[in-house]
Amino acid sequence: MNPTTNIAIRAARKAGGIVMRYFDRIDSLKVSEKQANDYVTEVDRAAEATIIEVIRRAYPHHAILAEESGEHRGNDFLWIIDPLDGTTNYLHGFPQFSISIALQHRGQLVSAAIYDPVRDEMFSASRGAGALLNDRRLRVSDQKGLKGALIGTGIPFRDQRYLKEYLDMLAAMVRDTAGIRRPGSAALDFAYVAAGRLDGFWELGLSAWDFAAGTLLVQEAGGAVSDIRGGDRHLESGNVIAGNLKVQQAMVKVLAPHVPDALRH
Ligand code: IPD
Ligand code: CA
Ligand code: CA
């Protein structure tokens, strides 16, 4: 396996240990609100510090972009880290959250690890070498279109500028598919698309650390990731559609009439 993917896995597993250690005493955690409905705990910070330590020990000159501590300068390798994706779930004892770590080289994703510490599921991918769940090869579903498809999404809870348009999108997807799920960790949602557990996924307003790793996983599992208009500006815009190619293309079409004007250019 690619050595950088190994480091991502090692860091994600170590952070998962910290996250689980606190999970049975979440009541005693110090929580602060970064902005409306956006919470951070000492666990997010401790997990992030551990991830950065593991990466820095192996690659002292690489750059880092981490959700809680921001940018750490370095060379043209960039690690993109979400130390705890699904903090709101975590704080409620709702067992769906993950650690997400991606590596880009000059803008191209090369390594990814997404770890679900509750189920001990390690999703990983290396560019050109496929995607794995623990040691098993992953492949997106072979669903032929939206009819019968199970689709994941994220409901806006922080920034509600496009809530009306989002609800129109949701209505369209409810009509055309077998069902919609809102599990609450975007990184795991992508991993589930890669594993064929979801046929597709969409969300508006994500940050790069929510789905950089997930993007490589889906691509390496044979799936497609685009922005909300079917283009390739998803990591910049945070508005994203992922799925097996047929489902992703069908979603672009069904969602198109409801894309907010401000997101059309
Ligand atoms: C959030 C989760 C959630 C998604 C939000 C993200 P966080 O990440 O991925 O599923 O809907 O947009 O911000 O804040 O728990 O790391
Ligand atoms: Ca996140
Ligand atoms: Ca987070």
Image (cartoon, grey):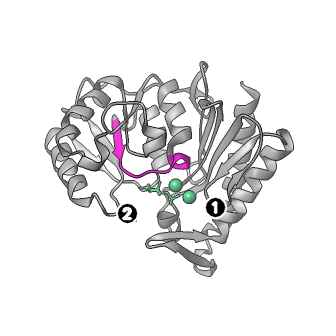
* Foreground of the two, 32 or 119: 32
* Foreground of the two, 250 or 178: 250
Question: Which residue is situated farthest in the top direction here?
Answer: 128
**What stretch of residues is rendered in magenta?**
200-210
- 112 with respect to 190 (left or right): right
Residue 204 among magenta residues: yes
* Separation of residues labelled 1 and 2 (CA atoms): 18 Å
* Foreground of the two, 196 or 228: 228
Please provide percent x and percent y for residue 252: 26, 33
Q: Which residue is mark 2?
A: 159
Q: Cβ(mark 1) to ligand 3 < 8 Å?
A: yes
User: How many marks do you count on the picture?
Assistant: 2
For the C terminus, give its image quadrant. Answer: top left
> In the rendered view, would you say 145 is above or below 185?
above
Q: Is residue 126 visible?
A: yes
Please provide percent x and percent y for residue 210: 51, 49
Q: Which residue is mark 1?
A: 68
**SS at mark 1?**
loop
